[in-house]
Image (cartoon, rainbow, N blue to C red):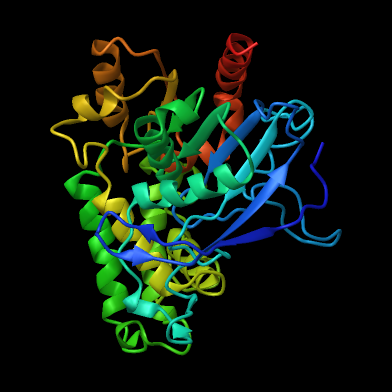
Amino acid sequence: MSVGIVEEKFITFDQDLKLESGRILGPITLAYEIYGTPNADRSNVILVLHAWTGSAHLAGKYTEDDPKPGWWDAVVGPAKLLDTDRYCVICSNVIGSCFGSTGPASVNPKTGKRYNLSFPVITVRDMVRAQKLLIDHLGINRLLAVLGGSMGGMQALEWATQFPDRIASAIVMAATARPSPQAIALNAVARWSIFNDPTWRKGEYRKNPKDGLALARGIGHITFLSDESMWQKFGRRFSARDGLFDFFGQFEVERYLSYNGYNFVDRFDTNSFLYLAKALDLYDAAWGYESVEESFERVEAPVQFFAFSSDWLYPPYQTEEMVKVLGKLGKPVEYHLIPSSYGHDAFLLEHETFAPMVKKFLEGVSKSRE
């Protein structure tokens, strides 16, 4: 069953947030959505953390004729994995994004103009500190779980290390303690494509720089897929619209990247894309500590990790390194390697592969709190 018609909510905090860079950001607006109802002591709340270009619109529709539900609609709702008859589920848009929370596309109240590149560089830790403002405002002392994949998984790790007393568990999917040089390199090429689009104008554009952003998104899509999934989805099929020897003729995989790249331009802000990419590249779970071990020593809650066999953006060995560290520290940790051909996006597309383990894990955490 669907959660039905949902409402996007907004809250503005008239306080300054000191960022990891040392700069100050405020006031801060956060967009968020709530599904289900908190119980009497608010101990049934799960915070879902979105990935790079995600939003707070996790499930349901805004209107009856809304053509597309939330990005993880298959997971949230009555009798689904995150059962809204049992749990209260919250999702908020991260700062730096463009779906309602304060980001480079927002108007700076001090100038009356868009922040653009005057917006400060933010980190995943900054995102989580902003989320904590929301959780405090909602009167939730301790979250039952924080759950996310990719950048969402990084946020879950930050909750586990920075606010260990505020969560009862963490579920981390397709994430890493720090992106590899390869992952950073791919984001660097995506950035170049935007910087070299003359309509970007060093962030002072009137309209989204469509060619640069479309190319950047196309590069991203390649990292989200896998060699096997591309064979299954496209093979070496040539577009039926083009002649095989037309110079500009395209393979089906080329058409896919072009379609998704230019479609993305209509729904995402270019500067937000750049700022969130920078946050991904900067992410290091050991930031501010001597080592990952020192950072993970702060973890108190059980952590459930998932990696996907064909994920080459944040490959399984990077998850296994984190699991090994937590295990050596004697922390409660659980790990599942999911066989999948879907690549990095498997956590979004194949929920049925991990749902039984997540369900059992959440039930165990819930019972331990009774």
Q: How many marks?
A: 0
Q: How far across and down, in percent of the image, does residue 216 sit?
A: 36, 67
Q: Is residue 156 left or right of residue 57?
A: left
Q: Please say whether residue 338 is visible from this viewpoint.
A: no
Q: How far across and down, in percent of the image, does residue 330 sit?
A: 30, 9
Above or below residue 251? Residue 179 is above
Q: Viewer-proximal residue, 270 or 109?
A: 109
Q: Is residue 168 left or right of residue 129?
A: right
Q: Please say whether residue 280 is visible from this viewpoint.
A: yes
Residue drawn where x is 47% and y is 75% of the image: 105
Q: Viewer-proximal residue, 48 or 66?
A: 48
Q: Viewer-proximal residue, 96 or 150?
A: 96
Q: Quadrant of the N terminus?
A: top right
Residue drawn where x is 62% and y is 49% of the image: 71
Q: Viewer-proximal residue, 236 or 288?
A: 288
Q: How far across and down, in percent of the image, does residue 260 sit?
A: 51, 64
Residue drawn where x is 32% and y is 68% of the image: 120
